[in-house]
Image (spheres, helix red, strand yellow):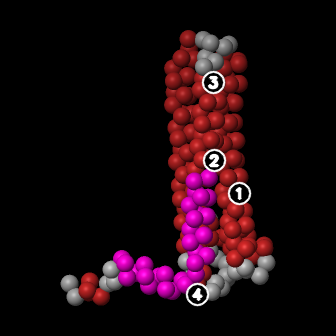
């Protein structure tokens, strides 16, 4: 039990971090990260809704002749791959947004360096040799958190879309003999 007596309370830990950071701009960064995640979530939701509407429309065409039905099924699969591309574009846009959030902070010597840093932290690659001042050491954690969270949202959405395609395929497969 003596070991635990040395642990700081949560209040003390937050106070120590605040004193260590000593940078009020970090609150702007946290607000930006929150807004970016909301925007990313809305964008992913829009991609999923459009995908499901398209697949539902395609599935409603079961009364069509068999040749057209195969073309519509192919269109559903192609729409899934387009959705993957849109998700990738969304993540690239997140990295660009992070770049534009970092540039006014004057942390990096060039705009490309801000872009590379944002990309490495967002994807949690982190192999760059970026030396940050003491008051910005929390920045990679915040950017990495948004990247991990955004990737999780995207993966869940893509899994949902793929499951929908597989389920529709099973249903259509059982009905294809009736055509």
Q: CA distance from mark 3 to mark 2?
A: 21 Å
Q: CA distance from mark 1 to mark 4?
A: 28 Å
Task: Look at mark 4 in the image and give the residue it sits on.
Answer: 134
Q: Is residue 23 magenta?
A: yes
First of labels 2, 4 by sequence position: 2
**Res. 124 in view:** no
Q: Quadrant of the N terminus?
A: bottom left
Where residue 93 is drawn, which disc sits there? 1
Is the C-beta separation of discs 3 and 1 under 8 Å? no
Locate residue 131: give its quadrant.
Answer: bottom right
First of labels 1, 4 by sequence position: 1
Judging from the image, what secondary structure is the residue with disc 4 in? helix
Q: CA distance from mark 3 to mark 1?
A: 29 Å
Where residue 57 is drawn, which disc sits there? 3
In the displayed structure, 29 sits above or below 72; it is below
Region of the chain picked out in magenta, as a range? 10-39
Query: Label 4: how many residues lie within 10 Å, few (<14), some (14-19) or many (20+)?
Result: few
In the displayed structure, 37 sits above or below 69; it is below
For the point 51% across and 86% down, the residue is 20
Judging from the image, what secondary structure is the residue with disc 3 in? helix
**Res. 163 in view:** yes
Q: Is residue 65 magenta?
A: no
Q: Nearer the viewer, mark 1 or mark 4?
A: 4
Between 157 and 74, the one lying in front of the other is: 157
Locate residue 126: give its quadrant.
Answer: bottom right
Q: Is residue 102 left or right of residue 110?
A: left
Between 4 and 62, the one lying in front of the other is: 4
Is the C-beta separation of discs 1 and 4 under 8 Å? no
Task: Look at mark 2 in the image and give the residue it sits on.
Answer: 43
First of labels 3, 1 by sequence position: 3
């Amino acid at each position: 039990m003596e070991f635990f007596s040395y642990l700081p309370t949560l209040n003390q830990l937050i106070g120590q971090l605040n004193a260590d950071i000593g940078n009020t701009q970090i609150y702007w960064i946290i607000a930006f990260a929150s807004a970016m995640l909301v925007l990313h979530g809305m964008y992913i939701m829009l991609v999923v809704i459009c995908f499901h509407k398209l697949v539902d429309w395609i599935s409603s065409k079961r009364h069509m002749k068999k040749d057209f039905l195969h073309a519509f099924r192919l269109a559903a699969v192609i729409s899934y791959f387009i959705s993957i591309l849109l998700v990738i574009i969304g993540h690239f846009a997140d990295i660009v947004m992070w770049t534009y959030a970092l540039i006014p902070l004057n942390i990096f010597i060039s705009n490309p360096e801000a872009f590379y840093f944002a990309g490495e932290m967002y994807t949690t690659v982190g192999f760059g040799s970026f030396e940050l001042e003491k008051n910005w050491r929390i920045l990679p954690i915040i950017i990495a958190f948004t990247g991990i969270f955004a990737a999780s949202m995207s993966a869940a959405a893509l899994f949902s879309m793929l499951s929908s395609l597989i389920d529709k395929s099973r249903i259509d497969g059982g009905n294809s003999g009736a055509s």
